[in-house]
């Protein structure tokens, strides 16, 4: 899982927010998650990603994209679609996906 802040351009851009509760055991999840990060980074319009998962299995991944067309292309990627099917049937007890347009972004403290 990604453990650093994504380096992003100035807004506007889009955030795909994926919150999930994992099922027990790995069942191939770890290797597939690594592959999805690698694959997403090759996707046109992909800007970056931030992800975390707690010991209780609850996790949040935010993937950033240039525009809605880039999000649609990522959703339609065949390898990603297979991973989604595994998520629905095997890896997640529950998940929520939200898509938001980022209008403003700032961070701190200044360094």
Image: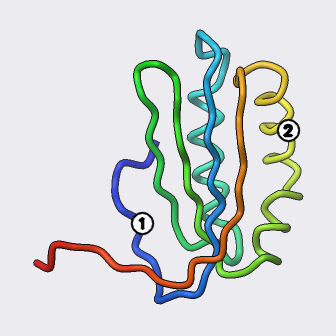
Res 69 → quadrant: bottom right
Between 83 and 105, the one nearer to me in the picture: 105
State the SS at label 2: helix
Residue name at image x 40 percent, y 73 percent: 7
Give the numbered dot on residue 72.
none
Identify the residue at the far top of this view.
24
CA gap between label 2 and label 1 equals 26 Å
Residue tagged 1: 6
Residue 14, position in %: x, y?
A: 64, 74
Within 10 angstroms of label 1, few (less than 14), some, or many (20 or more) residues? some
Between 45 and 60, the one nearer to me in the picture: 60
Residue tagged 2: 82
Left or right: 77 with respect to 24?
A: right
Measured along the vertical axis of the image, is residue 85 above or below residue 103? above
**Sooner in the amino-acid sequence: mark 2 or mark 1:** 1
State the SS at label 1: loop
Residue 40, position in %: x, y?
A: 65, 59
Residue name at image x 61 percent, y 67 percent: 15
Total labels drawn = 2
Measured along the vertical axis of the image, is residue 47 above or below residue 53? below
Residue 44, position in %: x, y?
A: 71, 76
Residue name at image x 89 percent, y 58 percent: 76
Viewer-nearest of labels 2 and 1?
A: 1
Res 88 → quadrant: top right
Q: Quadrant of the C terminus?
A: bottom left
Left or right: 77 with respect to 29?
A: right
């Amino acid at each position: 899982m990604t453990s650093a802040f994504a380096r992003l351009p100035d807004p506007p851009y889009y955030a795909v927010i994926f919150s999930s509760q994992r099922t027990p055991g790995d069942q191939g999840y770890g290797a597939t998650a690594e592959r999805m990060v690698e694959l997403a980074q090759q996707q046109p319009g992909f800007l970056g990603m931030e992800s975390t998962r707690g010991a209780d299995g609850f996790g949040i991944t935010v993937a950033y994209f240039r525009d809605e067309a880039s999000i649609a292309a990522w959703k339609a990627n065949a390898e990603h679609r297979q991973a989604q099917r595994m998520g629905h049937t095997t890896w997640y007890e529950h998940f929520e996906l939200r898509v938001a347009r980022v209008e403003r972004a700032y961070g701190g403290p200044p360094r």
